[in-house]
Amino acid sequence: MIKTVFVGLISFIIVSSLLLLIGYLFDIKFFMFSFYEKTSTGFEVGGSVIPFIIGIICSYFIGNYYQKRQHSY
C-alpha cells in the first residue's frame, strides 16, 4: 500500500513538473504558473492549475495500474 502511494506521489510530481516545464519553454499560458508578475500598472497575480489537475488524474491512474499489477503477481 505504501509503495502505491509513493508511486502516485512521484508520478504527480513528474507529470506536473513536465507540464510546467513545457509551459515555460514554449510560452503556453495554460501550463504556466506565475504567482507574481510586475506590470506597468502594478502587479498581477495568477496562474493555471491545469498542470496540477492533470498530474492528479495521471497519478490516480498510474497508482491504480501499479496496484493491480502488484496483485496479479
Image: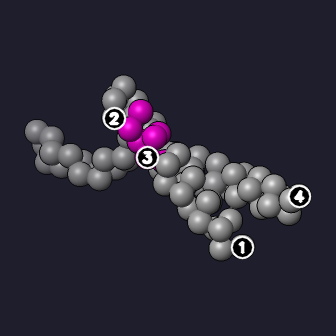
Where is residue 34 drawn, in percent x and y? 31, 47
In primary-sequence order, the first of circles 3 and 1 is: 1
In primary-sequence order, the first of circles 2 and 4 is: 2
Residue positioned 18% across, 49% down in the render: 43
How much space separates mark 3 and mark 1, taking CA atoms?
25 Å
Looking at the rendered structure, the secondary structure element under dot 2 is: helix
| Mark 2 residue crowding within 10 angstroms, few (<14) / some (14–19) / many (20+) | some
Numbered label attached to residue 46: none
Q: Nearer the viewer, mark 4 or mark 1?
A: 4
**Looking at the image, residue 34 lies above or below residue 40:** below
Numbered label attached to residue 72: 4
CB within 8 Å, label 3 to label 2: no
The answer to whether 23 appears left or right of 7 in the picture is left
Numbered label attached to residue 1: 1
Q: Nearer the viewer, mark 2 or mark 4?
A: 4
Where is residue 25 drawn, in percent x and y? 33, 29
In primary-sequence order, the first of circles 2 and 1 is: 1
How much space separates mark 4 and mark 1, taking CA atoms?
14 Å
Numbered label attached to residue 24: 2
How much space separates mark 3 and mark 2, taking CA atoms?
11 Å
Give the extent of the magenta segment: 16-22
Where is residue 48 drawn, in percent x and y? 43, 46
Amino acid under disc 4: Ser
Amino acid under disc 1: Met
The residue identified by callout 3 is 17
Amino acid under disc 2: Tyr
